[in-house]
Image (cartoon, rainbow, N blue to C red):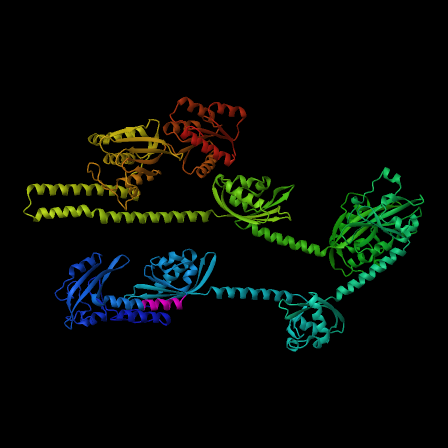
């Protein structure tokens, strides 16, 4: 949508508020006494507003016909020419002038202010604008306009929470609205700022994208806009309305922001509440329970599907009716009693007898409870028929069992885990001669004859906790009579969870059993919930009912005499037969055994047998305790399938998982997924074999960060997760960026029991970030270079040209000049030409440095000789001014620089020092070690006039090109120090100045030392490649060179000594020891330090190296942190002579 300008008024094309605004603005423009005339870049007049006509101007021209007239050839005002002023507009310069005594169409005289301004589009001149103001009524009109503007601004403030107007460059021209204060902004604070930069972040990006869409489509845009301010997120409905010129050029953008934060928050809360209600509804629907809701009068207000099924009433039949009458359960009086009870108790329960469709009675437990608002009562009905029946059966069974135990002729007692008797039946008391009070709490071992313990141990803790244990025990009665008995101890879990034993005594005295059934006491088997059976010679002798039911029989008697293999699936018959054969012959076989059983109806199920055996009358008997483990097997299968699925997922993703578990108070690795090898190069077995391997491969520079993060996680008792980004060095020696997400499980005291980790390779992400950062920096630098160049060309070259043109014009046209004046003017022209030549040469040098076209060939140079040549080149100028130059730089300082460029640095700095020094002043050059290991710090200090503090920051900047005359009137281009800075930075150094006005200046800068190379000597190509990569990562400021043997290395060292030599010990052609000895003999100036790195080396060889001055000897593979420290110490010693 676009608003086009026509003669004398703006045609509104927007609706609503924008239309109102444009109409108001149009009226203000029409009523203000301002004349407006616009023209194109060729001078054609394309717009004249009606106020020009009202002022009575241009009456000598026809208004309709003036469109298309060329303003550069047509005089607009009689007897007054503005052509010279219009020419300034073509050059990009606005103007303002007063026009006096202008005759209007009605013969009046008025005074006008004429203002002209060029119009640009993307830095291109596209036309101009003329404004005409009547001086007399200007003040009155201004007051009226201010009133109207204030009225509109107040309207904007009331209609919109935030209202902003920008120009086409997105610079804010107007802002208002009640919500500005919420964003900690004011209209004065943001006027002139870029609206995208104002918000920044994701909000700024969204706004930028929407603005670009408006530009392309030329239509308004509406969207939701979120702004974060002081941890609070504000939501706005944003509307962008553009205004385009007649030619389709964007002129203004109107931004309307309506604050909808409260509405959004309310909507989110409502959505969460709906989701929560749906969640609870799904839970209730999935339960078999019936649920309905009553109001305080007992009328039904909610009736779910389960209620319909249970009570046989549809929702339409139940809603609004009194539930007691509808369900024929309670009357209103009883309901009031329920409410009174609910005031005292949170839940009121009652069992209801309901007859189903087949007239079978079912028991339901109804639970009544108040809702939170106390206005509703929630009723949940649960079918407890089976539960009640089982409780009754269990109660009946317990009572029957108690009677059996109390009245049986068998001796039965119960023993706790301390061996104390806490129950004994009447038969037990009578046979052993004790009263109940005497036997309670008595140690069972006290009933056993003392001679038994001479060859046997009786320890309840050693008994099997799942199956019965059978012993032959000699017992002593209270009267001292000895009874021989066979005791069966059956484990039993008490109410408090403690393990007790039921002791069942048989074969008391020496009576022979009448038959096998009497031997095995069927009453004991009947009382057991587990399936118990006795087998001998492959046949079932006795089985309890529980055993029978497991195999599909109703009574245990039906299994007597049955072949045991008839209860086994055909698939497992051979396995079961072999197992029982081993057991019957006393061979080694497990006490627990699983097989596929067969029920009476030939269906199959999984069963587990717990086996114990005993011998009686030379016959083997096997007691079997049986359990149906089908559900357990099904669960195990599901777990296996889940584990397999999980394993397939984890093994096919690029990230790897790991788990640690506390064992013996040490965190030990449990597993690593196979993807660990993709990221680290090491296999999962490597990590499981070395619990600290992951920490060992952490990049040395990141180790302390990782250690601190893990330490904080371990020490905290509440933090359960952490995330960290760091570098590792993989098995191939490459740096890999990883993101490690850690979750822990703690015990009740806060101690970590398990650690779960997920490690992702984020190297590509990091590289992309670095590339983006470098690209951004390069673009900014390129843009700065462009701005600097344009600034110099447009400003500094103009001055000498103006001087040359001015004096040549005088020489050419002024015939009255004297010969002396002519010579003086020629000298002025010569000085300007020299100044311009120096400026152009400096500018070309600077441009070549900026664009990288300058020849840059650094080499190893002796600093003293280079500086002496520079001193000699300026010594003549120094002698003329009586300035002394001293150098304290010795011969043992070697630098790695380009000879030509660094000579230019010293020449410029010395020339500047001489320029601003007077007779008797001194210039001193010195050098010392810089803070950085690879650099020397040089100083050029003078005792001249110094530099004012406010000018110091301008010295090295091209865009502010600072220059002053020397003490003898010397002139400069102002680019010398800029060139010096560029050259030094090209070498990797920095430059700065310390100065006190009136006392002199001290220019300091750093240059790289002679060698920036580390030499690796190793005959193994793989090791050379590996440790080259490692060194590039831990010493990025150095380049890596390699040699395959000692002879090759020695030649390279003689030609260009490196900063450090790392060599193998054993090599076919001159090993490490011989190489070090040759270096000692050669007496090379600045001999590099040596580190030995070898796969095999003994203590004798290490001592020999120490005798030669080698301090660091490592065996492969090395500890990266120790190796990095040794490299850094050796490089520091090479530069400073100490660690």
Q: Is residue 229 left or right of residue 87?
A: right
Which residue lies most toward the top here?
Answer: 1081
Q: Can you give x and y, in whole percent of width and height, for residue 617 in the image?
A: 89, 45
Q: Main secondary structure of the magenta part?
A: helix
Between 739 and 422, the one nearer to me in the picture: 422
Q: Position of residue 440 (x, y in %)?
A: 86, 49
Which contiguous range is marked in magenta?
148-160
Quadrant where the image shows the C terminus: top left
Magenta stretch: residue 82 in it? no
At a point 35% along the width and 69% down the height, the residue shown is 18
Q: Which corner quadrant of the image does residue 1077 belong to?
A: top left
- On the rendered structure, is 463 left or right of 1091? right
* Percent of width and height locating residue 36: 23, 67
> Is residue 225 visible to the viewer in this orientation of the structure?
yes
Q: Quadrant of the N terminus?
A: bottom left
For the residue pair 84 and 980, the one nearer the viewer reads as 84
Viewed as shown, does residue 557 lie left or right of 687? right
> Residue at image x 22%, y 70%?
51
User: Which residue is at a point 70% across and 54% down the rendered structure image?
Assistant: 633
**Residue 968 falls in image quadrant:** top left
Above or below residue 653? Residue 699 is above
Query: So how many labels did they put on this image?
Result: 0
Residue 157 painted magenta: yes
């Amino acid at each position: 949508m676009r608003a086009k300008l026509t003669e004398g008024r703006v045609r509104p094309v927007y609706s609503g508020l924008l239309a109102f605004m444009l109409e108001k603005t149009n009226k203000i423009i029409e009523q203000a006494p301002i004349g407006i005339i616009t023209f194109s870049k060729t001078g054609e007049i394309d717009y004249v507003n009606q106020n020009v006509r009202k002022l009575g101007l241009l009456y000598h021209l026809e208004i309709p016909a003036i469109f298309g007239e060329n303003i550069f050839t047509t005089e607009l005002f009689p007897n007054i020419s503005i052509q010279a002023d219009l020419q300034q507009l073509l050059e990009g310069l606005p103007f303002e002038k007063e026009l006096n005594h202008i005759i209007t169409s009605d013969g009046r005289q008025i005074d006008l202010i004429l203002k002209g301004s060029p119009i640009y589009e993307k830095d291109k001149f596209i036309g101009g604008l003329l404004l005409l103001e009547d001086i007399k009524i200007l003040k009155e009109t201004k007051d009226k306009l201010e009133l109207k503007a204030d009225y509109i601004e107040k309207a904007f403030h009331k209609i919109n929470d935030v209202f902003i107007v920008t120009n086409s460059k997105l610079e804010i021209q107007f802002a208002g609205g009640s919500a500005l204060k919420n964003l900690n902004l004011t209209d004065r604070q943001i006027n002139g700022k870029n609206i995208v930069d104002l918000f920044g972040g994701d909000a700024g990006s969204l706004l930028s994208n929407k603005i670009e869409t408006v530009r392309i489509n030329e239509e308004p845009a509406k969207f939701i806009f979120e702004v974060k301010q002081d941890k609070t997120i504000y939501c706005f409905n944003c509307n962008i309305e553009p205004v385009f010129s007649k030619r389709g050029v964007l002129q203004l953008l109107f931004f309307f922001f309506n604050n909808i934060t409260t509405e959004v928050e309310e909507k989110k809360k409502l959505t969460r509440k709906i989701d929560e209600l749906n969640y609870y509804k799904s839970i209730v629907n999935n339960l078999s329970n019936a649920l309905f809701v009553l109001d305080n009068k007992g009328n039904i207000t909610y009736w779910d599907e389960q209620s319909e099924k249970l009570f046989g009433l549809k929702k339409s039949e139940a809603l609004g009716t009194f539930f007691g009458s509808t369900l024929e359960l309670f009357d209103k009086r009883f309901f009031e009693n329920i409410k009174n009870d609910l005031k005292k108790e949170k839940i009121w329960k009652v069992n209801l007898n309901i007859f189903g469709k087949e007239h079978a009675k079912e028991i339901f437990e109804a639970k009544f409870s108040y809702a939170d608002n106390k206005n509703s009562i929630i009723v949940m009905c649960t079918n407890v028929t089976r539960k009640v029946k089982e409780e009754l059966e269990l109660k009946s069974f317990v009572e029957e069992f108690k009677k059996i135990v109390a009245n049986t002729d068998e001796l039965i007692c119960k023993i706790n885990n301390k061996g104390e008797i806490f129950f004994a039946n009447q038969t037990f008391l009578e046979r052993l001669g004790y009263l109940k009070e005497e036997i309670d709490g008595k140690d069972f071992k006290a009933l056993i004859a003392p001679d038994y313990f001479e060859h046997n141990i009786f320890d309840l803790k050693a008994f099997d906790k799942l199956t019965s244990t059978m012993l032959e025990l000699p017992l002593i009665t209270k009267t001292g009579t000895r009874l021989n008995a066979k005791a069966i101890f059956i484990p039993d879990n008490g109410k408090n969870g403690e393990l007790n034993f039921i002791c069942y005594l048989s074969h008391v005295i020496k009576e022979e059993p009448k038959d096998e059934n009497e031997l095995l006491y069927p009453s004991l088997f009947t009382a057991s919930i587990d399936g118990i059976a006795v087998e001998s010679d492959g046949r079932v002798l006795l089985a309890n009912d529980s055993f029978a039911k497991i195999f599909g029989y109703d009574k245990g008697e039906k299994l007597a005499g049955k072949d045991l293999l008839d209860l086994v699936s055909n698939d497992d018959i051979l396995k079961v037969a072999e197992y029982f054969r081993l057991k019957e012959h006393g061979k080694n076989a497990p006490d627990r055994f699983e097989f596929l059983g067969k029920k009476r109806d030939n269906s199959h199920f999984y069963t587990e047998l717990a086996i114990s055996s005993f011998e009686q009358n030379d016959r083997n008997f096997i007691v079997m305790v049986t359990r149906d483990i089908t559900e357990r097997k099904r669960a195990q299968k599901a777990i296996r399938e889940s584990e397999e699925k999980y394993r397939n997922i984890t093994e096919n993703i690029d990230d790897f998982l790991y788990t640690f578990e506390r064992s013996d108070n040490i965190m030990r690795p449990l597993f690593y997924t196979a993807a660990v090898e993709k990221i680290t190069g090491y296999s999962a077995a490597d990590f499981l074999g070395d619990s600290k391997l992951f920490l060992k491969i952490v990049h040395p520079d990141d180790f302390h960060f990782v250690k601190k993060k893990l330490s904080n996680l371990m020490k905290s008792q509440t933090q359960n997760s952490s995330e960290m980004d760091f570098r590792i060095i993989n098995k191939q020696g490459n740096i890999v960026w990883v993101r490690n997400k850690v979750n822990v499980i703690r015990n009740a005291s806060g101690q970590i029991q398990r650690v779960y980790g997920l490690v992702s390779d984020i190297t590509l992400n990091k590289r992309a970030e670095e590339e983006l950062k470098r690209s951004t920096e390069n673009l900014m630098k390129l843009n700065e270079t462009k701005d600097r160049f344009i600034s110099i060309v447009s400003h500094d070259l103009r001055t000498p040209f103006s001087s040359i043109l001015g004096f040549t014009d005088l020489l050419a046209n002024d015939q009255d000049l004297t010969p002396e004046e002519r010579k003086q003017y020629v000298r002025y022209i010569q000085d300007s030409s020299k100044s311009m030549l120096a400026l152009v040469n400096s500018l070309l040098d600077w441009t070549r440095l900026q664009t990288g076209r300058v020849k840059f060939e650094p080499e190893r140079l002796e600093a003293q000789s280079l500086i002496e040549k520079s001193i000699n080149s300026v010594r003549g100028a120094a002698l003329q001014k009586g300035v002394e130059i001293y150098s304290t730089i010795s011969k043992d300082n070697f630098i790695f620089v380009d000879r030509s460029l660094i000579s230019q640095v010293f020449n410029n700095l010395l020339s500047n020092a001489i320029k601003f020094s007077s007779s008797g002043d001194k210039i001193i050059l010195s050098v010392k070690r810089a803070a950085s290991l690879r650099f020397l710090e040089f100083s050029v200090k003078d005792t001249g006039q110094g530099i004012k503090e406010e000018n110091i920051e301008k010295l090295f900047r091209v865009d502010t090109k600072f220059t002053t005359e020397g003490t003898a009137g010397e002139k400069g281009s102002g680019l010398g120090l800029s060139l010096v800075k560029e050259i030094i930075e090209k070498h990797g150094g920095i430059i700065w100045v310390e100065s006190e006005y009136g006392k002199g200046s001290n220019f300091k800068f750093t240059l790289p030392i002679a060698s920036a190379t580390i030499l690796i000597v190793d005959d193994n190509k793989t090791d050379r490649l590996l440790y080259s990569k490692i060194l590039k990562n831990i010493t990025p400021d150095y380049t890596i060179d390699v040699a395959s043997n000692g002879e090759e290395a020695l030649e390279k060292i003689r030609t260009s000594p490196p900063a450090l030599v790392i060599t193998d010990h054993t090599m076919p052609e001159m090993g490490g020891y011989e190489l070090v000895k040759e270096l000692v003999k050669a007496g090379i100036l600045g001999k590099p330090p040596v580190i030995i790195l070898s796969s095999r080396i003994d203590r004798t060889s290490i001592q020999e190296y120490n005798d030669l001055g080698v301090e660091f000897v490592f065996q492969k593979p090395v500890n990266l942190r120790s190796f990095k420290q040794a490299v850094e110490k050796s490089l520091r010693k090479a530069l400073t002579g100490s660690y």
